[in-house]
Amino acid sequence: MESMQSKRAEIRNMCADVLEVRWNDTHGKVRRSTALLEDISPSGACLQVESEIPVGVRIRWECQNQPFAGRIRYCTFREIGYFAGVEFEAGVTWSKQTYTPRHLLELERLVSQAKR
């Protein structure tokens, strides 16, 4: 079985920022939750949330006037909460120029600096 890391086409950047996310439950009711942004890449993100969000659900949020939307690919409980992987929708992408999380650790840049 392939790990999630091996399926990723890009390096995720570790980060931390508090977000308010929204999605519709199975009855069509809008649900809201505070989430912690754990990592981000141009095509997806990982959020820590308080309650489980069903796989396949469309989730959305906005940061610094930059809208994000995607589908939940996994939602797993780990000791401190649920971790939900989000794959951004077509046309939605992240870049540091459009939104910089409060805390951002660019792993690719660190690796390239260490090789010098």
Image: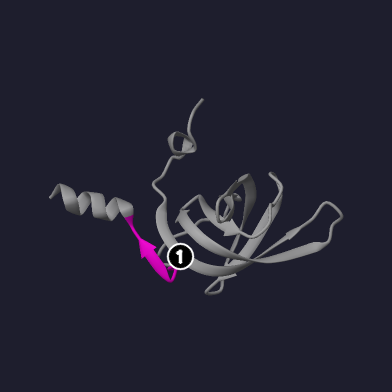
Q: Is residue 4 above or below residue 23?
A: above
Q: Is residue 102 above or below residue 85?
A: below
Which residue does the image show at 71% across and 47% down from the upper left? 54
Is 98 in front, or is 41?
Answer: 41
Identify the main secondary structure in magenta: loop
Magenta residue check for 104: yes
Is 32 in front, or is 11?
Answer: 32
Residue furthest front as drawn: 79
Q: Residues within 10 Å of mark 1 (few under 14, many from 20)?
A: some
* Image coordinates for residue 107, horizontal then vertical, percent: 32, 53
Residue furthest right as drawn: 27
> In the picture provided, is 43 more to the left or to the right than 22?
left
Which residue does the image show at 84% across and 57% down from the upper left? 28
Q: Which residue is mark 1?
A: 16
Magenta residue check for 48: no
> In the picture provided, is 115 more to the left or to the right than 42?
left
Magenta stretch bounds: 98-106
Is 14 in front, or is 116?
Answer: 14
Disc 1 residue type (three-letter): Ala
Badge 1 element:
strand
Which residue does the image show at 87% across and 55% down from the upper left? 27
* Image coordinates for residue 23, horizontal then vertical, percent: 72, 59
Which residue does the image show at 16% across and 47% down from the upper left? 115
> In the picture provided, is 14 more to the left or to the right than 113?
right
* Image coordinates for residue 81, horizontal then vertical, percent: 59, 55
* Image coordinates for residue 57, horizontal then vertical, percent: 71, 49
